[in-house]
Image (spheres, rainbow, N blue to C red):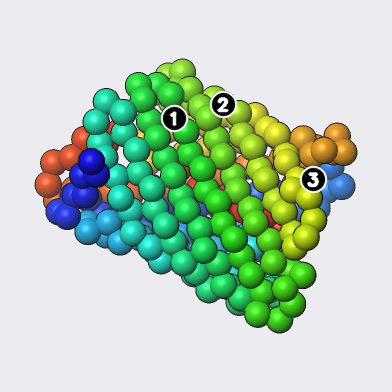
Amino acid sequence: MLTIKALSQSECGMQEYYDMSEQQTFTLVPIVYFQTRHNWYFEGRYNYEALNTASAYAGKVFEKKAAFSYSFNPVLGLVAGKFNGGSAGMNIEANYKKISFSSQSQFTFSLINRDQNFTYSWSELSYNAANFLEAGISLQQSGEYETKNKFDKGVFLKLECSRWTLPFYVFKKSGNEKFFVLSLIYEWTHTNTFRNKNNRNYNNN
């Protein structure tokens, strides 16, 4: 059922997330990733799992390109800095005409204190209103060790120009507090053979 393109495209990208809450806390979250022609996937993050913490992930993308396109990408990672441990996750994308769905989930564990273990996911459902404009709804889930999951609901707009994407998110926490996420994304694709071509966030503990 899956079509894996062994000689398709190599892809790389850079993402910079700016997270600001109503208390005016401001956090930079840079992310870089690279996907080889054989669909091996590598990603580096900073301030994602926790403040002053770096992480590195590796995995492989399995995908099918058709009228209904989808991909899933299991990854394993190491986390070091203020938080030290490991992480396992899954990135999922699906596209049908102008509708897109994406989800990034992970379980991250501490080597020092299991009370710091947590789960996290960021999911999006969007509609491509124009070649340069995408809008949708988003949901963040976070859960620490032996605590109830928290859900932050949000809406977003994405402006696209060539290889650049500018998303803006507004999230509402369960206590009615709002926080905002502004991102700048640059993606580069190198094509070696033809393939039809029809993005990922983070948790600051």
Residue 85, horizontal then vertical, whole percent? 61, 76
- Amino acid type indicated by mark 1: Ser
- Amino acid type indicated by mark 2: Gly
The reply to whether residue 30 is in sight is no
Residue to which mark 2 is pinned: 136
Residue to which mark 1 is pinned: 100
Front residue (pair 90, 195):
90
Seen in the picture, residue 41 relative to 2 is either above or below; the reply is below
189 lies left or right of 137:
left
- The residue positioned 36% from the left and 25% from the top of the image is 96
Look at the numbered discs 1 and 2 and tell me whether their residues touch, using CB distance below 8 Å. Answer: yes
**Label 3 environment density (alpha carbons within 10 Å; few <14, some 14–19, many ≥20):** some
Seen in the picture, residue 110 relative to 135 is either above or below; the reply is below
Chain-order first, disc 2 or disc 3:
3
The disc placed on residue 21 is: 3
Instruction: For marks 1 and 2, give the CA distance.
Output: 9 Å
Front residue (pair 189, 119):
119
65 lies left or right of 109:
left
Instruction: For marks 2 and 3, give the CA distance.
Output: 21 Å
Residue 137, horizontal then vertical, whole percent? 60, 28
- Amino acid type indicated by mark 3: Ser
Residue located farthest toward the bottom when viewing the structure as drawn: 112
Where disc 3 sits, the SS reads: strand
Figure quadrant of residue 130: top left
